[in-house]
Image: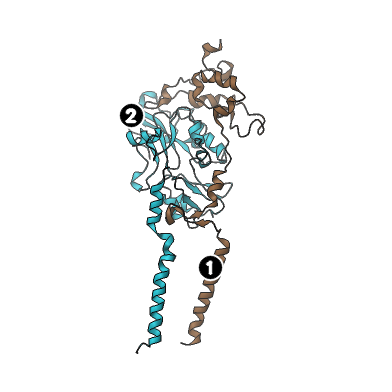
Chain colours: A cyan, B brown
Amino acid sequence: MQPSRRKFLKTVCAGAASLIAAPVILKFLEPGEALAAMEKSKLRWAFLVDTHKCIGCGFCVKACKNENEIPYDASVSRTWVERYVVKKDGTVLIDSPKAGRDGFTSPEVEGQTPEAQDIAKAFFVPKLCNQCENPPCVQVCPVGATYQLKEGVVLVDRKWCIGCGYCIASCPYGARFFNPQLKVAEKCTFCYHRIKKGMKPACVGACPVGARQIGNIKDPEDPVAKVITTSRVAVLKDEYGTDPQVYYLGLDRAVR
Amino acid sequence: MNRHVLRPVFVALGLLAIILIARTIMVPSDFRISEKGFMYGYHRQGNEAEWENFKVKYRSKKYCEDCHGDEVSGNLSSPHKIIECENCHGPAIDHPDNPEKLPIDRNRDLCLRCHAKLPYPTSMRSEIKGIDPKAHHPEKACFSCHNPHHPNLEDRK
C-alpha cells in the first residue's frame, strides 16, 4: 500500500506537535529545577539526641502529647523513650511503658528486676521521626497527602489523608501511627508551628538535661550543627538509605 | 474504518474527559509541586499554613516570669532551674485567660520520674540523687519535706 501525500503530511505534523508539547507537559518532572531550588536552601532542620544525658523522665513525651493534641491515654505517641538494660551475661532488656510518658520509676524491665551488679550498661534512647532526606513514607502516599518541605520537615495534610496506612507500614523507624481521633496518619513535625516562630519544639523545651536539641545543619555557626559535624554521631538504620536527620550521641549496638 | 470499530474509542475518550473534568473540580488549585520536586514535594500548598497556625501551648519559663517573677527567680537559683515550670504545672496555653488556673500536681510519681533510684551505668540517671520509693517515707507526699521550686532541705530551714 502506497502512503498518500495527505497521510504523510498528517503524520509529520502530529509528530512535530507532540515533540513541542512533550517538554511542556513534562516540565513539572524536571529534576534540575528541583535540585537548583534545593541547593539554594539555607535551612535544614536536624535533631541531636544525647543518650548519655537522657535520664528517662519522660517529660518530652508528656509535653509532645499535650502540645500536639495527641490522645493522652491512647497507646500512640509522636515521640517515645526506650530503656535499654544490657546485662553482664549479654542479655538485653528493652521496654517503653506508655511510650515513656510517665517516666521510668521502677527498676523492673520486661518482668525482670536486674541487680545493680549484673548490669553492664543501661541507658535511655528517645526516639522521634527522623525527618529523612529520602522519606519512604512520602514516596508511598497514593494521594500526595504527605510531603517534604524545603526545610526538611515531613508533614501530613490532615484534610487530604485518606488513612490508607501505607506510610505507617513503610516507615522503618515506626515513627508514624494512626491518629485514633482524626482517623489520619500522624507523625512528629519537629513542632513545625513552633520552630517556624523561632521557638524550640515542645520536647526540646521540656527536656531538663539538654538530651534533645534541634538545629540548622546548613548553618556552620549553629551549636547543634557543630556537634553533628565535629563529633562522632550515629543515625538509626543507616543501611535503609533514608538519610535520617536525627543524630545520636552514644548510640549502642543494642539499639534498633 | 467502520463506525462500530471507532465506537469504543469514543466511549474511552468520553470517560477520559469526565475524569479530567472531575479532577479539575475536586483537586484544590494550590495542589502542585514545590522545591522538593515531584517525588517529595507534590502537595496542597495551603496545608503548610495550616500547620504553621497550629496552637502553641507550651510558653516556657519566660512567659511565667512576667507575673510569677518571685517564684521563677527563686527557682532559678536552685538545682531545679533546669526544669520548665510547665513540666509540673501543665501547659500555660493562654493562662491566665484560658485556663484561668493551672493545676498543681503534688503526686509522688511526678518527682519519681527523675528521683527514683536506677543504678544505670553510662546513663546520667545514676548521677541524680535518687531514692527507693518503697523505702523512703512511702506514706508521705514529697512536698511535705522538700520544696519543689527549691529542693534543698537546708534552704527550707
Residue in view at x 41 percent, y 70 percent: A20
Residue topped by disc 1: B20
Q: Nearer the viewer, mark 1 or mark 2?
A: 1
Task: Check disc 2 and give the amino acid type.
Answer: Lys
Left-right relation of A110 to B68: left
Question: What number is the disc on residue A88?
Answer: 2
Expressed as whole percent of the image width and height from the top left, the position of residue B87 reads 54, 29
Expressed as whole percent of the image width and height from the top left, the position of residue B12 reads 51, 75
Residue A215, image quadrant: top left
Task: Check disc 1 and give the amino acid type.
Answer: Leu
Left-right relation of A3 to B130: left
- One can see residue B133 in this view: no
What chain does badge 1 belong to?
Answer: B
Q: Residues within 10 Å of mark 2 (few under 14, many from 20)?
A: few
SS label for mark 2 = loop
Question: What number is the disc on residue A157?
Answer: none
